[in-house]
Amino acid sequence: MAHATYKRPGWKTPIELRAHRGGLIAFGSAAVLLLLVGRAEIPLVDDVRMAAADASRQVLQVGSEAADWVAGGIEHISNAVTLYDENERLRAENAELLAWREKAMEYERRIEAFESILEISYTPVKGVTTASVIADTGGPFSRAIIVNAGASQGVQKGDAALDRFGLVGRVISVGSGSSRVLLLTDTSSHIPVVIQPGGVRAILSGDADGQPEIQFVPGDVKLSEGAAIVTSGDGGVLAPGLPVGVVRLKEDGGAVAALYADIARVEVVALKRYEFINDVDVPTMPVPDIPAPEAQPEPTVAANPATGQ
Amino acid sequence: MVVSIFSRFIRWVGRRLPFLLALIACIAAIIPMRLPGDLEMTPLYPLMVVFFWGMHRGDLMTPAPIFFTGLFYDLLSGAPLGLWAFVFLVVHAMALVLRDTFGRVLFSAWALFAVTCIGACFLAWAIASIYDWTLLNPLNFVVQALVTIGLYPFFGFAFAFVERRVVVPMRA
C-alpha cells in the first residue's frame, strides 16, 4: 500500500490529520459559515436544493423502483403466509362494508337534494397532478418527500398532497421536474383544522414520533375519541374539507391525530390546486351619521377582574 | 499513446471512486424503502463511506470531497445547509485519531465506528437543536445511529473488497 507507515516516531497526531489540517479548518469553517448564512432562510438555498433534487431525479427514480420491487417481494411472501386469515378478515369486512354502502348511497341522494336547494359552491379545483414519490428524506430533521412532478407539470407551491386515504402534506418547494412535499408529521408543519362534530377549530402540528398533535383547542371543549378531522381552510393555506384523520386521546390529556394517509409508505400522491377566493368585493356601505361618543369615565382599579383586586 | 491516456483515465476514476461512492450513498439514503413496519429511519450511508474511506484511504478521501458529500446530503435530505458537511469533517478527524490510538482490525473497526456514529448523531442533534432553538426529540437520532451501526459490518466488508479489488488495481 502506498501509505503503509501510519505512525512515524515523533508524530503526535496522525499523518493524514496533519496533512488535512488546513483543509479541515478551511472546509469546517465554510460549513459553519453556511449554517449561519442558511439560518437567514435565503430563497436561493431553496432553489439550490430543488436543483440538486432535479439533478438526482433519474437516479432516484430507478432506485425507488428497485426498492419498490424488493418491498413488493417481501410483502408478497408475508402475504402468502397469512393468506387464510387475511381471507377470513376480508370476508367479514366485506359484509360490514356492504351495509355501509347502502347508507352512503342514501346519504348521497340526500346531499344531492340539499345541494340543489341551497346552491352551494365549493372551492373550485384548479388542477390535479399525479406524481410518484421518488425520495423520502427519512432523516431526523425534516419529514419530507420528493415527488417526480414539478413546475413543468403545473405543480405550484402550496398544493395539497393527498394519497388514497387522505392528506399527506403540502408542497413547499417546486423544481422544474420535481417538488418537495412537507409531511404532516414534520415538526415545522402547522395546519389549521376543524374537528367535525361541533366544528372545533384547532391547529395540527407535526411531532417527531409520527402522530401530529392537536393544539390550541379552546379550553372548554372536550374532544372525543374518533372524531373526524378535516382541514379548515383558514388562512388560505389549504382548501377546506380535505380529510386528515381521527382524534386519538392521550393519557396525559392531550390529543393527537391518527392520520388516514399511510405516510410511512406513500407511493403516489395527487397534488391538488384550488382557486382561492381572497378578493371579495365588499360593497361600500353608506357611512351612518352617528354622533361622536361621549368621553368614557376612567375605569377603576377595583373593577379589573384579571388581577382580582 | 491511447493506452497511456486510457490508463491515466482509469487512474483518475480510481482516485475519485470513494467520492463517487459517497455521492451514491447520499442518494441511496433518501430512496424510499416502504418496508413493512413502522421504521421510517434510513441509515446514514454517507457516514459509513466517509468513515471507512477516510480511515483506510486518507489519500483519496480528503476534506474537500468530504465537505461536498456533506453538502450534497444536506441539500437532498432537507437538513440545515452545512450541518452534515461539518459533522462529516469532524467524523473524519475522529476516525483518524481513533485509528491511530486503537488500530483498525476488523472487529475493533466496528466498535470505533459505533463510537464515531453515536458522536456524530449527538453532534448533529446538538447543532440542529441550536439551529432551531428548540430541544429536538433525540429519539430519532438514537434510532438512526443504531440502524447505521447495525448495518456497518456489511458495508465495511463490501468497501474493503472494493478497496482491495477495484481501487488498488485501478490506481496501480
Image (cartoon, coloured by chain):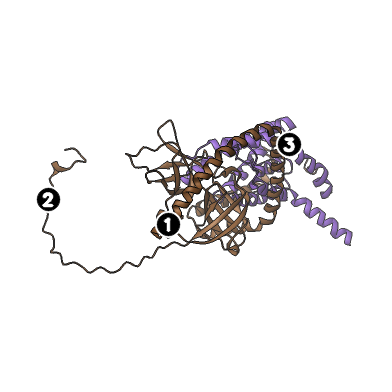
Chain colours: A brown, B purple
Identify the image quadrant of the N terminus of chain B: bottom right
**Residue B64 x, y percent position in the rendering:** 66, 51
**Dot 1 and dot 2 residues touching (CB under 8 Å):** no
Image: A175 above or below A200: below
The chain that hosts pointer 1 is A
Query: Can residue B118 be seen from the camera position used here?
Result: no
The chain that hosts pointer 3 is B
**Residue B69 x, y percent position in the rendering:** 65, 50
Mark 2 → mark 3, Cα distance in angstroms: 79 Å
Q: In the depicted view, which residue is nearer to us: A32 or A117?
A: A117
Mark 1 → mark 2, Cα distance in angstroms: 53 Å
Q: Which residue is mark 3?
A: B154
Give the residue type that dot 2 points to: Glu
Question: From the viewer's perspective, is A8 left or right of A130?
Answer: right
- Look at the numbered disc 3 and give the secondary structure of its residue: helix
Give the residue type that dot 3 points to: Phe
Residue at (46% x, 48% y) in the render:
A107
Residue at (21% x, 68% y) in the render:
A287
Q: Which residue is mark 1?
A: A115
**Residue A61 x, y percent position in the rendering:** 68, 53
Q: Which residue is mark 2?
A: A298
The disc, 1 or 2, on the residue closer to the chain's N-terminal end is 1
Query: Can residue A263 be seen from the camera position used here?
Result: yes
Q: In the depicted view, which residue is nearer to us: B68 or A86?
A: A86
Image: A42 above or below A265: below
Give the residue type that dot 1 points to: Glu
Front of the two marks 2 and 3: 2
- Look at the numbered disc 1 and give the secondary structure of its residue: helix
Question: From the viewer's perspective, is A260 left or right of B117?
Answer: left
- Look at the numbered disc 2 and give the secondary structure of its residue: loop
**Dot 2 and dot 3 residues touching (CB under 8 Å):** no
